[in-house]
Amino acid sequence: MSDFGMSGDDLEQMYQEVILEAARDPHGRESFARDVSREDAASADVSSGEDTVRAAHEYCTPGESHQFNPTCGDEATVHAEVSETEPHRIERLVWDGHGCSISQASLSVMVDLCAGRTVDEAMELFRDFHELMESRGAGLNDDAKEERLGDAVVFQGVSKYPMRIKCALLGWEGMRDAVAKALALAAK
């Protein structure tokens, strides 16, 4: 990865600032998911396996996925609307949830990168981001992948910390699952 002529400490500081900014002003965040952390929600049947899906676009199939990281308590519900025609495109991608700045920033960056893309393009980004998280801080040795990931490369530093990798991947896993559910519904 290019170091932009900066020292390692300066680069790490820049990455931290980008993550904190994305967490402060998250893109794609909407309030639509049931708050399962509230006491009155505990009486609701959240284990039924039923997904709450709604589509804002007439020719889209919606899918939702709730993700929870038991290690730190981060959780997010990702809602994806996928076009019914080929090539399938993610027409709408939003999320609701709470957690650390890493999970919130990763969700925001994921929305910026994947909304409006074809499912194939979004899944390629998903794989590239997973590879970045598996690098343990080394980054990617592929300029094309880094270019595709855009702002998501700032999470390279996060990949040094195994306990934080799950935070960064939470939303990406939710996006993949929500898209898969939308595609399954569209196939029926």
Image: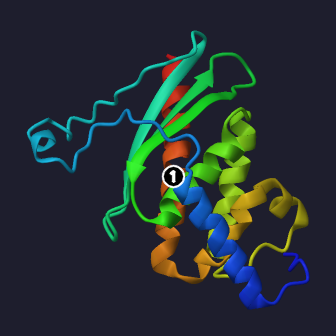
Residue 98, image quadrant: bottom left
- The type of residue carrying mark 1 is Gly
Residue to which mark 1 is pinned: 171
Residue 121: x and y in percent read: 75, 41
**Along the line of sight, the residue nearer the viewer: 115 or 145:** 115
Classify mark 1: helix, strand or loop.
helix
Residue 107 appears left or right of 96 = right
Q: Is residue 77 visible?
A: no
In the rendered view, would you say 128 is above or below 187? below
In the rendered view, would you say 129 is above or below 119? below
Residue in the picture at 59% in, 50% down:
108
Residue 142: x and y in percent read: 86, 68
Residue 111: x and y in percent read: 62, 44
Residue 145: x and y in percent read: 82, 60
Residue 50, image quadrant: top left
Residue in the picture at 34% in, 69% down:
72
Q: Quadrant of the N terminus?
A: bottom right
**Along the line of sight, the residue nearer the viewer: 65 or 14:** 14
